[in-house]
Image: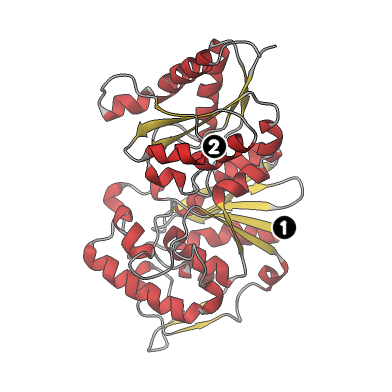
Amino acid sequence: MTPVALCAPDKLRGALDAHEAAQAMAEGCHQAGWDAIEHPLADGGEGTCDAIVRGRGGRREQISTRDAIGRPRKAMLGVLPDGSCVVEAAEAIGLMHIPRNRRDVMRATSAGVAPLVLAALDLGAPRIVIGLGGSATVDGGLGLLIGLGLKAYDADGNVLRGRGMDISSVVRIELSGLDARLAQTELIVALDVDSPLAGPLGAAPVFGPQKGASPEEVQILDAGLARLDTLYGERARRPGAGAAGGLGAACFLLGALPIPGAELVMRETGFAAQLAKADLVLTAEGAVDAQSAAGKTVARVAQAANGAGLPCVIFGGRVDEGASTLYRVGATAVLGIGRGAKPIREALRSSAADLTAATRAACGLYGTTR
């Protein structure tokens, strides 16, 4: 009987999206004489909407919005067969859409997520899943809330726009203008971190620098997020409030229920049913390190495989020190896919071929019959 491998990767950022990675892995399985199930995953950031729509057989709608620095952009909204919608923040305000020389967290705003949420409400969605992660913003979600009808004022009574530079000036917010349909809609937020909104482990110190914030800007932003923490109140103080530059807190203020992103995507895409058909589980991500064990996609997949009594091989475009922690959560092997030293651009270009070759090798170790 031909053995079956479940190919369930996340993206390899900068090289392959999750769908492309699953295809490359499946090719390696076929070369080794195995059957393959392609099941791309995500953790709440980039690729979340695509993974859920592919897994559920929904459709995509292009929504006109703006990116984090205000440029016009078309972003994908996922519409599922039951009418639920999937909003991926990174589709609108993702860091990957902003050239490095134009990244500016003080100007950046999460307002571009609001048209996606409003489009879902216009479609009558009974449930909206909002995937966080990969944003270019550190505005505490104020831009999103303003886009949904909230009003924010400074000490002089001026109405604020909700950019990163605005959050240190907010002294008052009015919730009464928020779209009334939000209260009648189930909101779920998919998180990939559990950071608080402000403080040493908050959104600005932890994620601000990678979005282009200088040390001085980090201090200004953190002070602003502390101000928002007070204004948003207890309802928004949950683990993950600092996700996507504070979008988590804004979603909590709207009543959203948090769920770990990888767990949610696996559930929404029917991962368990595919797992039951497999003899071997294969997963991958761009960089595998100690942080991967903290709820990332590869760790969730390894845990599920271990619970089903199946071996799980984790591939990484890069495998760093600390990746061995994944063995504690159920990984059978953690392997890098690179073959020989290469310049970074060449390594990225060869990722699909390298992943195919690594997959073929792993399947070969398990034989061709079951």
Query: What x and y, as percent, mark residue 230?
Result: 45, 81
Distance from Cα at disc 2 to Cα at disc 1: 33 Å
Label 1 sits on residue: 125
Above or below residue 132? Residue 255 is: below
**Quarter of the C terminus within the rendering:** top right
Label 2 sits on residue: 302
Numbered-mark total: 2
* Label 2: few (<14), some (14–19) or many (≥20) C-alpha neighbours in 10 Å: many
Say left or right for 195 vs 310.
left
In the orientation shown, which residue stands out farthest toward the bottom?
Answer: 156
In the image, 14 versus 204, the foreground residue is 204
Cβ atoms at labels 2 and 1 below 8 Å apart:
no
Dot 1: what SS? loop
Q: How is the image coloured?
A: secondary structure
* Label 1: few (<14), some (14–19) or many (≥20) C-alpha neighbours in 10 Å: many
**Would you identify the image quadrant in which residue 245 lies?**
bottom left
**Would you identify the image quadrant in which residue 222 lies?**
bottom left
Query: What x and y, as percent, mark residue 292?
Result: 43, 43
Above or below residue 168? Residue 79 is: above
- Nearer-N-terminus badge (2/1): 1
Please give the name of the residue rendered at 50% of the width and 22% of the height, measured from the top-left corner.
24
Please give the name of the residue rendered at 56% of the width and 40% of the height, measured from the top-left corner.
303
Return the mark for residue 288.
Answer: none
**Quarter of the N terminus within the rendering:** top right
Say left or right for 76 vs 231.
right
